[in-house]
Amino acid sequence: MSGLQLVRRTWDASGGQEPASGKRIADAIADYNVAATAREDWFGLVLELRDAEGRLVGGLRADAWAGWLHVIYLWIDAPLRRAGYGSGLLAEAERIALARGCHDAHLDTFDWQGVAFYPRFGYREFGRLEGYPPGHVRVYYHKRLAARPEPARAAP
């Protein structure tokens, strides 16, 4: 890497912030993907569940691109779990995604999180990472939201 300098930046879950360069890298990949596919339909989504005092007690973070919803995080505060809030947030994210042209959804979870939850809503497992973290499994899910559009065909 003649003339280039490698700069290492780390942060952790204890409150560190991702450096601005992280967003620049993501933006560069997004630009590359748009140039390669002509798909500019990316959107981000955050759904917040707040109590009467305005405290965040649950939420969903997702993004979507090229007709695919990607659920990144779904969290409900422990005292509110198993009361339908998670399923409501998931359904709302899917509704928004459908309205914006998405036909599929994907997500991942760990064996101690949502492996019993997501299949109840039509998500099907398509992959696993055994031993991530050691003694556990990361599980990947997919759900068809709507029929996929036929690709455009070139004129004869």
Image (cartoon, rainbow, N blue to C red):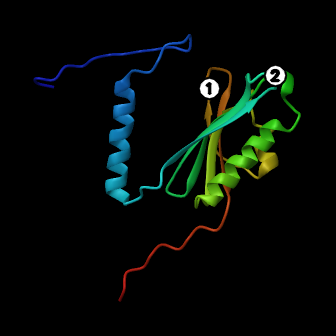
Circle on res. 56: none
Give the secondary structure at mark 1. loop
- The residue drawn where x is 56% and y is 70% is 149
Give the secondary structure at mark 2. helix
The residue pinned by badge 1 equals: 131
The residue pinned by badge 2 equals: 78
Whether 57 is drawn above or below 101: the answer is: above
Of badges 2 and 1, nearer the viewer stands 2
- The residue drawn where x is 62% and y is 47% is 106
Q: In the rendered image, which quarter contains the C terminus?
A: bottom left
Asked whether the viewer can see residue 10, the reply is yes
Per the model, the C-alpha gap separating discs 2 and 1 is 26 Å
Q: Quadrant of residue 98?
A: bottom right
- For this view, does 55 lie left or right of residue 4? right
Q: Estimate the x, y position of residue 140 in percent, counting from the top left.
A: 63, 42
- Residue furthest out toward the right: 83
- The residue drawn where x is 68% and y is 21% is 135
Asked whether the viewer can see residue 139, the reply is no
Q: In the rendered image, which quarter contains the N terminus?
A: top left
Q: Estimate the x, y position of residue 30 in percent, counting from the top left.
A: 38, 45
Q: Estimate the x, y position of residue 103 in percent, counting from the top left.
A: 61, 61
Whether 59 is drawn above or below 34: the answer is: above
- Residue furthest out toward the left: 3
